[in-house]
Image: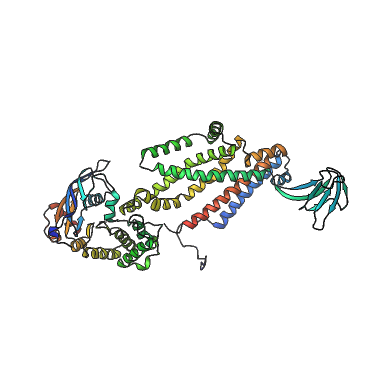
Amino acid sequence: MAGFKPVNPPKQMERQPNKVLWNLVFGLILFVVGLGLYKSSQSIDYSWRWERLPEYILYKSDNVVRAQFDGTVSITADNTVILTDDFDANNIQQVTEFQSSLVYDGDLVFEGDPLTSTVAWKAGPLLDGLVMTLKLSMVALVFALLLGSLTGLARVSPNPALKNLAIVYIELVRGTPLLVQIFIIYFFIGTVLNLDRFTAGATALAVFTGAYIAEIIRAGIESINKGQMEAARSLGMDYNASMRYIILPQAFKRVLPPLAGQFINLIKDSSLVSVIAITDLTKAGREVISVTFSPFEVWFTVALMYLVLTGLLSFLVTRLEKKYALHG
Amino acid sequence: MPSTADTEYIIQAENVDKIYPNGHHALKSVSQNIREGEVVAVIGPSGSGKSTFLRTLNQLETINGGEIVVDGISLTTPGDVNKLREEVGMVFQSFNLFPHMTVLDNICLAPMKVRGLSRSDAESRSQQLLQRVGLSDKAGSFPGQLSGGQQQRVAIARALAMQPRIMLFDEPTSALDPEMVGEVLDVIKSLASEGMTMVIVTHEMGFAREVADRVLFMEAGELVEDDPPEVFFNNPESPRLQAFLNQVL
């Protein structure tokens, strides 16, 4: 901040905690917990193999192009490997864009011999899972926000049909476990409407989160001073216009923090869709364990990857909050 | 402006009853007729129903008995309540400015959305009104950046932007620091001198005496006294008003 000068600590009667001391205590507690974890990991009969994990996140793949038939190789000036069939000059295999050539000009090669190789980074199953979790969460988030906002508005509407529909929806969804909802949507509704896994999973998450968002939106609307609606109505604006221009913009700012919490919940809840065989981060973790037999390392890694996603979301929402916190 | 003698009543309230859902009987058979251009002050102890009566006039409160006709519109007949409110401006005790909008947008919003004015027309009207309440330099400010007196003047400008025929004031200075009361009352006085029909619920006795054509006294939901200010303050008839005036003056 420009022009900000450090000031002396305030003079007051009440004793304040010693900042330095208690920060040290905090550090000490973290250290002791970390040490305890380390010691207990040593004491159990488990061989830690962290070095195996990175390749399941990102790995280098060697993409080798092989000869499709017997023939003679020629390499042109612009670095193209051309394989010509010795018995049929029209039969040609061309390879461009490679990193290293494994043959020389004039070489005689047989079908299946390597011609060129290209080494590239590829996403491992864990990263693929993370991307799937992100995709699923974002799609569900957009629809949950839409559904939640409409339901929240219906919940405070004077129209009994809208209000009661909203109440029934909210109570049904909040009163049943997400896991059960996922099964119902995938096996029942999914069968009726012929939904694929992803659509069913995203729908279940959106429907579940939408109910919570609706309650958040309702609370936000009801938290706005009654005088705001009265002022808008006294100017001759109808209910809808008053909502749209006066109440909702103010409510939106107020519900950002609880909405952020709900979005974070959504990302975490998305781990449950692995039960309908969507390869999200959690299911990818289980698959990697079945290959590596290193469950501890994998689950710690999976947890960290979820933490990165939710941390990023928290950060974005905090920035949004600051942007809108300026007035009112 | 036609003389008061042959003007129709712009506000007619007859035997108005208001009972809140919790059983509180807030208005007991209140009748009152107000002519165009008249300034009527309503005085009374808190809880006497004076604010409730004011709020029934633009149907922020519904009534349970009697009849109210404002500017030819019957408030007990089904119809478009917004048409009524377009003609009746209201100023609140707690200002109720829209905190997420600039002062200019606060004033422009209703004329644009309700009257269908273009933004430039609404803005020039708003600028004129801001000038009139002495706040031309605050157009771009947010309500939170203004003092209470300034906010209330913006609220008056906001109500005036709809060009209402009647203005209702619900204790417009009660939430203000003492040094800011004057600036708000001055704006209301200038409105009175221009012939605006106004109903003002207030605790400012001096102001009521100076600006009002008639002063009403309400107590316990009843309209107890209805006099010109000289009579009201000097020779009050009802013993209840006498007791009230003795306490506050």
Q: Is residue A15 visible?
A: no
**What residue sits 17% from the left and 51% below the top?**
B32
On the rendered image, what quadrant is the N terminus of chain B found in?
Answer: bottom left
Q: Is residue B196 visible?
A: yes
| Place of residue A186 in the rendered image (x, y in percent of width and height, measured from the top left) | 56, 34
Q: Is residue B245 left or right of residue B116?
A: left
| Place of residue A319 in the rendered image (x, y in percent of width and height, measured from the top left) | 52, 55
> Residue B194 versus residue A97: which sits nearer the camera?
A97
Q: Is residue A35 above or below residue A278?
A: below
| Place of residue B128 in the rendered image (x, y in percent of width and height, measured from the top left) | 32, 66
Q: Quadrant of residue A306?
A: top right
Q: Quadrant of residue B159?
A: bottom left
> Residue A12 versus residue B158: which sits nearer the camera?
B158
**What residue sits 54% from the left and 51% below the top?**
A314
Number of marks in the rendered image: 0
Q: Is residue B24 left or right of residue A186?
A: left
Q: Is residue B85 left or right of residue A219?
A: left
Q: Is residue A218 above or below residue A186?
A: below
Q: Is residue A56 left or right of residue A77?
A: left
> Residue B213 versus residue B196: which sits nearer the camera?
B196
Give the colouring mode of the picture. Answer: rainbow
| Place of residue A89 in the rendered image (x, y in percent of width and height, measured from the top left) | 84, 48
On the rendered image, what quadrant is the C terminus of chain B found in?
Answer: bottom left
